[in-house]
Amino acid sequence: MAMFRKKHLAKILSSLERFKDPKIELEQYETPGDVAAEMIWIADMKGKIRDKVIADLGCGTGILAIGCALLGAEKIYAVDVDGDAIEIARRNAVKMGCNDYIEFLKMDVSDFDINVDTVVMNPPFGCQSRNADRPFLNKGFEISNDIFSLHLARRDVERFLEKYSAEFGFSVHFLKKMEMELPARFFFHRKRIERMDVNIIHFERDKRV
Ligand code: SAH
């Protein structure tokens, strides 16, 4: 696999095909290329991407899965409940030449049942239906020791994540805050773009003694 600089990775990921008709009830919005690159890059610096088996929960158009493949992941399971998204993700993977490393699975994340080294995800923030992020967190805690994820950088969300993950024996590391554009309709049912701060988070299973 080629060597990448972070900026180069961000540029490549920004060029991928996007959702055609985003499904609002599934909170479909792509992670911006720079945010996706940042998350995968940090995870790789921590030794959690290269040569690892990874699950991308709610893969959408595949940006996180493809980022992992480009940084040398051994294998990525890309899971999404929406067949239209999977089709786009597959096209993106073929275009990027990393189709062989990614297995696409059309299913609810709750039904995915394979233990992996690392989970990457940008789950629904739970703005459309409350607690929509819960199945993603639960599954991550079940199948992996290291989860890299994006969540709204809001004090109440941060407190919730700390409390919730502690119940599963995980610690929360807030790695970086980034600004991201989100369709306002997810929050206010208005057709606008809203700038929001999101946290790149590493959930790490506490060592058992
Ligand atoms: N990971 C992509 C997409 C994020 S949008 C990116 O970072 O750009 C969230 C994705 O989760 C959507 O593609 C949506 O179809 C999917 N999704 C929502 N609920 C789901 C569920 N219960 N099971 C599987 N996928 C789900």
Image (tube, rainbow, N blue to C red):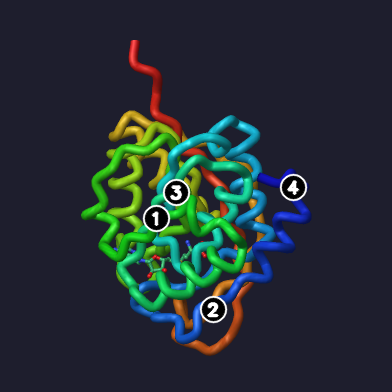
* Position of residue 149 in the picture relative to residue 34 (left or right): left
| Ligand 1 falls in quadrant | bottom left
Q: Which mark is residue 4?
A: 4
Q: CA distance from mark 4 to mark 2?
A: 30 Å
The residue to which callout 3 is attached is 76
Q: What is the residue that sits farthest to the top in this orientation?
A: 209
Dot 2 surroundings within 10 Å: few (below 14), some, or many (20 or more)?
some
Q: Nearer the viewer, mark 1 or mark 4?
A: 1
Q: CA distance from mark 1 to mark 4?
A: 23 Å
Q: Earlier in the sequence, mark 2 or mark 3?
A: 3
| Residue type at tag 4 | Phe
Where is residue 41 shown, x and y percent of the image? 65, 44
- Residue 70 to residue 30: above or below: above
Does mark 2's beta carbon lie closer than 8 Å to ligand 1? no
Q: Element at badge 1?
A: strand
Q: Residue at 39% across / 32% down in the picture?
A: 145
Q: Element at badge 4?
A: loop
Do the CB atoms of the residues marked 1 and 3 lie less than 8 Å apart? yes
Q: Which mark is residue 103?
A: 1
Where is residue 83 shown, x and y percent of the image? 34, 74
The residue to which callout 2 is attached is 183
Q: Earlier in the sequence, mark 1 or mark 3?
A: 3
Q: Earlier in the sequence, mark 4 or mark 3?
A: 4
Q: Residue at 55% across / 62% down in the picture?
A: 63
Do the CB atoms of the residues marked 4 and 3 lie less than 8 Å apart? no
| Residue type at tag 3 | Ile
In depth, the one of 169 and 26 nearer the eye is: 26
Q: Element at badge 3?
A: strand
Q: Nearer the viewer, mark 4 or mark 2?
A: 4
Q: Which mark is residue 27?
A: none
Q: Residue at 56% across / 40% down in the picture?
A: 174
| Residue type at tag 1 | Glu
